Every structure is written in C-alpha cells, then in structure tokens.
Amino acid sequence: MILETSTGRYAEGCHIKAVGRPHNGPDTVNNVLCPSPNMHVLCDKGAIVISDDFTLLEIAGVLEVHPKHEVSIEFLRYHREHFFKGE
C-alpha cells in the first residue's frame, strides 16, 4: 500500500522471512510485501499469515499481488512455520 503525503509517497516494507538472526532471510524483492503499518505488525507478530494461494489465515482476505511482483512461496511457508501463532 502506498500512502500519499504532503512530502511525497511512503510505502511500508515487510520481509516475509525476517532478515538477520536467527532467520537470515534475504533482502530481496520476492521476500518483501508492502502492507499497511498495522498489517506489517500483525505479520511480524505471527497474528496472521498467508497461505500458498495468498489467502490470509486468521482474518478474512486475500493478499493482492501485483502481476510483476513475484512473491516466494518458500518464504511464505517459512513464515507460517516459524511465526504463526494461530491454530
């Protein structure tokens, strides 16, 4: 999501597989989503995750992916296995 501000555009970036220790995810385009700040926190805290078909777990919805943005299914699976706190 892009936020238009009086000083320019702002976009939140969220790594699917966290960079740094202990996850060591890459800082690559296929490992980044651009959610709202609230959704970013929910993803980071494992309150929601994304299934392989881009449906959201724990809340109703589907991740909208730009046709030119390749999201790594491998990183989505890693996120579900290591971050998801739901059932």
Image (spheres, rainbow, N blue to C red):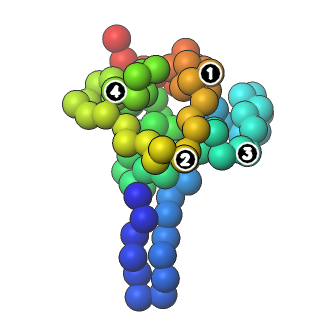
In the picture as drawn, the residue positioned furthest to the front comes out as 67
Could you tell me which residue is drawn at 34 percent across and 27 percent down? 55
Q: Amino acid at mark 1?
A: Glu
Give the vertical position of 28 relative to 53 (above or below).
Answer: below
Q: Which residue position holds label 1? A: 74
Q: Amino acid at mark 2?
A: Lys
Q: Which residue position holds label 4? A: 55
In the picture as drawn, the residue positioned furthest to the top comes out as 87
Disc 2 element: loop
Residue 41's quadrant in the figure? top left
N-term-proximal mark, 4 vs 3: 3
Mark number displayed over residue 68: 2
* Disc 1 residue crowd, few under 14, some 14–19, many 20+, Cα 10 Å: few
Instruction: For marks 4 and 3, give the one nearer the viewer.
Output: 4
Could you tell me which residue is drawn at 36 percent across and 18 percent down? 86
Could you tell me which residue is drawn at 42 percent across and 65 percent down? 2
- The reply to whether callout 4 and callout 2 are in contact (CB within 8 Å) is no
Could you tell me which residue is drawn at 48 percent across and 87 percent down? 7
Measure how far apart labels 1 and 4 are at the Cα level: 15 Å
Disc 4 element: loop
Measure how far apart labels 4 and 2 are at the Cα level: 19 Å
Give the vertical position of 7 relative to 19 (above or below).
Answer: below
Query: Residue 15: x and y, percent?
Result: 60, 42
Measure how far apart labels 2 and 1 are at the Cα level: 18 Å
Q: Nearer the viewer, residue 52 or 40?
A: 52
- The reply to whether callout 3 and callout 2 are in contact (CB within 8 Å) is no
N-term-proximal mark, 1 vs 3: 3
* Disc 4 residue crowd, few under 14, some 14–19, many 20+, Cα 10 Å: some
Q: Which residue position holds label 3? A: 27
